[in-house]
Image (spheres, rainbow, N blue to C red):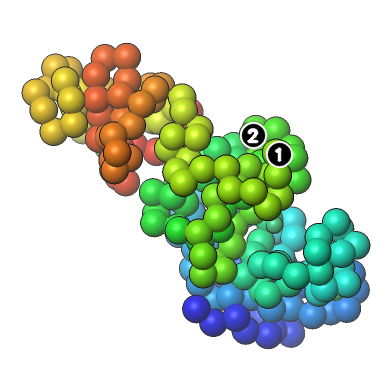
């Protein structure tokens, strides 16, 4: 973890430039955690994204207060970005899909589902790398913790098979195969195991590991 101070126009990674994280009050300040950039980059292959728009990145204390904050917190410290993710066809990735994907990627810092109190489909999500776990639902509270896992909180959710050979459907996690799902097929998950590595469909249980399925109807 390293929050760095930047000038405008600096390339931070394959998809991000420092200007995208600049405070919007006009002060010109930019502070971004390198781990936050790494986290945002991981979403590209995981969701097969076209782009990520940064709605709000670094905020100086004055600007944070102007937009309803306390003048402190993860944006003011350079750990946070409110973003909107887009698929390659230009459609928005629902906030729930990004939250589930981040959790599966092992992101145990900050996730604010439905940031800005928009609908899930509008896609806004708060992501921060401040070193403490906070899984919130900003449509309800900017500060309260909503859950310890979005795999429980967001049930039921949809997954789409991304393994070209399909995935097996079993009677229980790691148990007898009773069927299979084809590449591209979308199913609804109504329950997950304690480790959130398996999900229950109408036909039985499927493994939710990265590479087998992607969250959402894709
Ligand atoms: Zn500012
Ligand atoms: Zn935020």
Q: Determine the image quadrant of residue 33.
A: bottom right
Where residue 174 appears, as percent x and y from the top left, is 13, 33
Work out whether residue 170 or residue 93 is closer to the camera in this orientation and state it: 170
- Mark 1 CB in 8 Å range of ligand 2? no
Badge 1: few (under 14), some or many (20 or more) residues near its Cα, within 10 Å? some
- Residue position for label 2: 120
Spatial CA distance of label 1 from label 2 is: 9 Å
Where residue 96 appears, as percent x and y from the top left, is 55, 38
Residue 98 in sight in this render: no
Residue 189 in sight in this render: yes
213 relative to 88 in the view: left or right? left
Whether residue 142 is situated above or below residue 10 in the rendered picture: above
Q: What is the secondary structure assignment of the residue under circle 1? A: loop
Whether residue 1 is situated above or below residue 142 in the rendered picture: below
- Residue position for label 1: 139
Whether residue 99 is situated above or below residue 14 in the rendered picture: above
Q: What is the secondary structure assignment of the residue under circle 2? A: loop
């Amino acid at each position: 973890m390293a929050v760095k101070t930047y000038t405008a126009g600096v390339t931070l990674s394959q998809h991000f430039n420092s200007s995208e994280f600049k405070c919007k009050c006009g002060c010109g300040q930019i502070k971004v955690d390198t781990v936050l950039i790494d986290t945002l980059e991981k979403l590209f292959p995981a969701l097969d994204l076209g782009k990520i728009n940064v709605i709000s990145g670094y905020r100086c204390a004055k600007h944070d207060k102007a937009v309803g904050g306390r003048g402190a917190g993860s944006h003011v410290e350079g750990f946070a970005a409110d973003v909107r993710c887009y698929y390659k066809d230009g459609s928005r990735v629902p906030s729930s899909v990004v939250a589930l994907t981040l959790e599966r990627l092992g992101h145990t810092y900050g996730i604010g589902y439905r940031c800005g109190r928009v609908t899930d489909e509008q896609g806004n999500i708060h992501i921060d790398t401040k070193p403490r776990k906070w899984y919130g639902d900003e449509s309800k509270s900017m500060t309260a913790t909503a859950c310890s896992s979005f795999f429980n909180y967001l049930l039921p959710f949809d997954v789409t098979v991304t393994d070209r050979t399909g995935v097996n459907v079993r009677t229980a996690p790691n148990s007898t195969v009773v069927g299979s799902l084809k590449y591209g097929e979308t199913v609804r998950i109504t329950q997950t195991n304690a480790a959130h590595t398996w999900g229950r469909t109408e036909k039985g249980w499927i493994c939710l590991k990265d590479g087998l399925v992607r969250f959402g109807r894709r």
